[in-house]
Image (cartoon, rainbow, N blue to C red):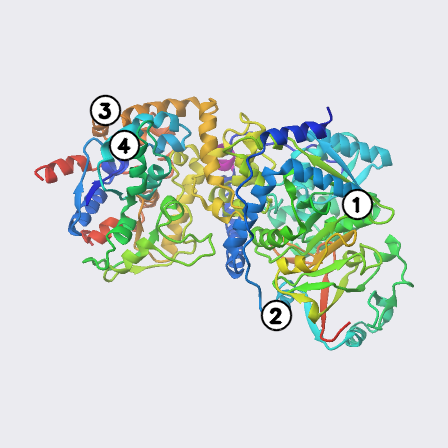
Amino acid sequence: MSSRQAILDRIKENKPAAPAPWVKPPFQVPLPQDRLALFQHSIGAAGSVGVLVPDLVSVGIYLQERFMSPDRVVNTVAGVGFGRDVSTAILEKEALAQVEVAVVAGVLGVAENGAVWVTEEQVPVRVLPFLCEHLVLVVRQQDLVGTMQEAYANIKVDATGYGTFIAGPSRTADIEQSLVIGAHGPKRMHVFIIQSEL
Amino acid sequence: MKVGLFIPCYVDQFYPQVAVASLQLLEKLGVEVDYPLQQTCCGQPMANSGFASLATGCDALFARNFAGYDYIVSPSGSCVLHIKDHLQVPGQEAETTHIRNHIYELSEFLTDVLQVKELPARFPHKVGFHLGCHGQRGLQLAQMSELAAPAFSKPGYLLSLVQDLEVVPLSRPDECCGFGGSFCVTEEAVSAKMGQDRVADHQANGAEYIAGADVSCLMHLEGVLRRQKSPLQVIHLAQILNGQVDA
Amino acid sequence: MDKLTPKTIPVPDHPAAAAAFQADAERANWHDQALWFIREKRDVASKQTPDWELLRETASQIKEHVLAHLDELLIQFEEKARENGIQVHWAADGEEHNQIVLGILRQHGIRKLVKSKSMLTEECHLNDFLAAQGVEVVDTDLGERIVQLAQEPPSHIVLPSIHKRKEEVGELFHQHLGTEKGASDPAYLTEAARQHLREKFLSSDLAITGVNFAIAETGGLVVCTNEGNADLGVHLAKVHIACMGLEKIIPKAEDLGVFLRLLARSATGQPITTYSSHFHKPAPGQEMHLVLVDNGRSTHLGKKDFYKALKCIRCGACINTCPVYRRSGGHSYHHTISGPIGAILAPNLDRQKNADLPFASTLCGSCTHVCPVKIDIHNQLYLWRQVLAQDGQVPKAKAVSMQAMATVLANPKVYRLAGRSGRFMLRWLPGVAQNKRLNAWARQRDMPSPPKESFRDWYLKNRKTK
């Protein structure tokens, strides 16, 4: 008998009786008008810089002021207007490893923890948001939700092959619990919140 | 209302003053208290060591001693919790159920049953309060720091009725003292260290007394304090509330 | 440089190992305070989250449902995962798990790999197994890399190197990564590890990850990290192998809304891990495998008093709060998973070897009440003690003294006679009695002084007339 069948048989024999049905209770959620402030607080607490801008062009202007040369930036968001186009960026490992700044659109932002849902539809390769030194996420204010439960109610996790909640620059505290921002992934992160429609 | 006073074995042997204070306090509050003379122990020392199976004689004795009372009251949260959770005697389900449902740790008996609103006690000292884990988390005599839930404390309320008593805050309000029954000898290194740390928390916060609702914890902490020749003293809640302490 | 000898497994004697840990007082105090600090962060985060207790109850209920329907959920998951293009393997035990992984490696001719944190692969001793087969395994979580270089097992499921001081990490990195001698700044050392591991990520064709949650409804899996090492490893590799214990399954994606609110807050006090990555399909050109491992779980599931330990989501909250763990260190538990949860999981695998662990607790109950899925941990510790005593896995001296104590306490007359002999009470405790020099209580604590009379004597004198 295969391990599969043996395991399943043993589970069937040993599993406990089903507990009484449990109806998920309603959970408190932040008021819609409070989401923005809470989201901004959360991304700041996670070590990112939150910037509220009226439109995508403002993101480009901000990046230009900060990074000067568009060569330093791989941009995947149409309308930002600054940085190298994905089509011109080389997507080999070695070239990707040299990417300094990556601009990526988020599908949705979560106020309670500052996480932004990014799927493989938003990136040319899955590794981009992890390999860059500095990640720039762009999310619409209207796409903010209060809690993770609201988030899952608004996304379909298997709509694409891969999706991730990103809640800040990579971090570790594995040496004496001393927080270091910039473990293996990005060392810095900006989150732009777009007031108008993308 | 007839109350049976349960004085755990080590209190009877080593801390009779706690038992006396408990008895006097209850009498002062107008309770008719009886001390069954054939009592010994709740059986916890065996059970927590893995030998609950050996405690059947002890359990039967306990049921025999206490089944006839309206309430059973004891100045030791840990022993009360053990009875509440584990007392079983084959063939005496009604008696043991009655006992389990009517056994009270002293402070909860005062707040919940007697609903004490005032006490003629004065204790002009700085007191750190060590409730004891089984009273705290098991009997829920006070809110534990682990839960996101409103704060309350039954012994804390009673201490607030005592004149001139100042409760000092602790940096770890409900950390275990490290006694743990036979743990105190089988895991000597960790147990003693826990006791030392618990004492240090009280010392750092300026307590003159460590007050508690569980004599086993106090016995442990006192063992540490005496070894250190510390002026800090342990005292049971009942002694403070009874107002009979030589201060 | 990465050829490491097998990890040393400490001797199964928690009290001795704990005493050895306490011998270095400075380190022991630091360890206690560092973990207590995390516990406090967890408290703050939980109290700032509305409905925290309701979230715990909901998570608990979901997990109870999972365990009661585990076979059905696994079948549903497997079907969906296969539709998604994930190759699903089943392993009865650690040995089969390791063979499956090795088979995939051989199939691709791969001899080195990167691995993000997976307690399951630790449980299966995958690293040692692969090393013996000539495969280079690089743990990429910083804490795991540290203990790997030190040739030690992790001492904590979330904070693998919490037992190491920064000077020791500095020395390790000096030897293995060529950092400056004597340098111990965590930021400097982390940067050195980043550069060292970046090269490993870029040159590895295969990545192993653990699994935090597997979603039955969608056939996907979720991996949570702060460092981004799981994602970097997987996205840069041609082959991804995810290894999971059977119990990691959850019914629906929406359940993640509950679990991800609890997990990081319970673990470190963060509102969420930096990355919560959902893998449903391999990337174009990539291959994705999932190994489902039983290793005793399906048997554990049948133990009425103990099966609820399988609800564990590996947050480590019970470990951080445990006053005994904080003062004895993870290695004293001589099991992959340390602390209270380890102490109730370990005896399921080997009672005799782990008979000391359920006794490494005061039964203070803090673990149970920080647990985000409400496992009755301290109650299970109590129940394991009963099983172990019945099983004869308790030291003889203890069994003898317990029998004596039980006899005395069941007989009031004998009890009173014994009581008069003064310090009888404390003599019950094994290790106190016979020999003053060996008296475990009195080494660091004074014995209580016996009073003139017992309470019963006082009562007879003062209340007898009533």
Q: Which residue is mark 4?
A: B63
Q: Which residue is mark 1?
A: C84
Chain letter of the residue beneath label 4 in the structure image:
B
Chain letter of the residue beneath label 1 in the structure image:
C
Secondary structure found at label 4: helix
Left or right relative to C187: residue C360: left
The quadrant holding residue B170 is bottom left
Q: Which percent across, then down, holds residue B18?
A: 23, 44
In depth, the one of B144 and A83 nearer the eye is B144
Indicate which disc, 1 or 3, sits on the residue closer to the N terminus: 1
Q: Which residue is mark 3?
A: C414
Left or right relative to C422: residue C443: right
- Foreground disc of the pair 2, 3: 2
* Same chain, labels 3 and 4: no
- Marks 2,4: beta carbons within 8 A: no
In depth, the one of C219 and C283 nearer the eye is C219
Q: Which residues are magenta?
A: C15-20
Secondary structure found at label 3: helix
Asked if residue A32 is positioned above or below residue C21 in the image, the reply reads below
